[in-house]
Amino acid sequence: MNSYDSFTVENKSINPYTICTWDDEADCANCENKDALACKWSAEGLLGFIIPALAAIAIAVFGMVLVGLLTRAWWPMIAFGAFCVFFFVFFEIRILCSHCPYYARKGFILHCLANHGIVKLWRYHPEPMNRFEKIALIVCFLIFGLFPVGVEVYGLWYTIPGISTIGMWPLLAMAGITGATLASIAAFFTVLVTYICPRCVNFSCPFNRVKKDKVDAYLRRNPVMREAWENKGYKLSKLDEI
């Protein structure tokens, strides 16, 4: 048994892995990562993720509903809903969230700056994501972003033959919602890579943009994570090299 596994048996506090993110007595004022990382929970940080994410999802779902009304084919909507439940409730929590320091907080509900409120079905994994997990995450994100657009493009194609009988409005509506879906998804991912990923403490995520010196500084403050990362071959920079 690894030290970070046995530690949970002995420590019954809310912070069994002694992660500084959940340590109310951590010396954040003198931390070299102060204001550089989103390493403490805040409602503002959560809203910064939730608002663009929900906007993109709402527009995409509206577009697929419109396609369903036009074509009477509801299977794309059902398939997308099933995928979202599988991915966000079960799969993403394991391959991505379980590696995040926010996941280390004791309890059955995840408290974080993205998937806040999701049930924690898996144990905490302080080690970095492996190659399969990274590839799977990228593939699932592509499905999440491109599937609604594909459905709406099909809706565009479906309305073209009926222009002579039903007029241009259905085509214009589908073109508008398709463009809005593309724009909202692009805006969401732009917010991610520009404002969220450069400060996120889930360092092994393939979209993470935190610089190595910041990662190393965080790991030095969190020995459980550091041990798990070093056991997987990660090398911290020497202090005199930073």
Image (cartoon, helix red, strand yellow):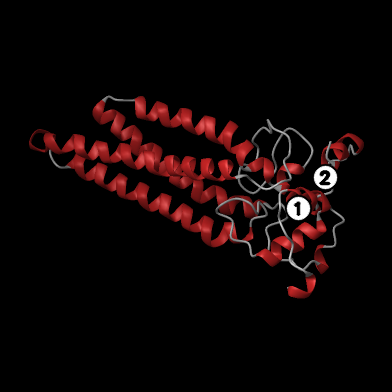
Classify the position of the C terminus by image quarter.
bottom right
Front disc: 1 or 2: 1
**Quarter location, residue 59:** top left
Q: In terms of secondary structure, where does tag 2 sit? A: loop
Q: Residue furthest bottom?
A: 240
Q: What residue sits right under mark 1 in the picture? A: 230
Gap in angstroms between the C-alphas marked 1 and 2? 16 Å
Of the image marks 1 and 2, the number of the one nearer the N terminus: 2
Q: Residues within 10 Å of mark 2 (few under 14, many from 20)?
A: many
Q: Amino acid at mark 2?
A: Tyr
The image shows residue 187 at horizontal and vertical percentages of 44, 55
Q: Residue furthest left?
A: 164
Query: CB under 8 Å between callouts 1 and 2?
Result: no
Q: Position of 71 compared to 230: left or right? A: left
Q: Amino acid at mark 1?
A: Glu
Vertical comparison of 210 with 180: above or below: below
Please give the name of the residue rendered at 63% of the width and 60% of the height, measured from the top-left corner.
199
Residue in front for this viewpoint, 69 or 92: 92
Q: In terms of secondary structure, where does tag 1 sit? A: helix
Classify the position of the N terminus by image quarter.
top right
Residue in front for this viewpoint, 162 or 99: 99
Q: Position of 162 compared to 7: left or right? A: left
The image shows residue 42 at horizontal and vertical percentages of 69, 53
Please give the name of the residue rendered at 85% of the width and 58% of the height, measured from the top-left corner.
26
Q: Position of 185 compared to 137: left or right? A: left
Residue in front for this viewpoint, 194 or 138: 138
Please give the name of the residue rendered at 87% of the width and 56% of the height, measured from the top-left corner.
25
Q: Residue furthest right?
A: 10
Q: What residue sits right under mark 2 in the picture? A: 17
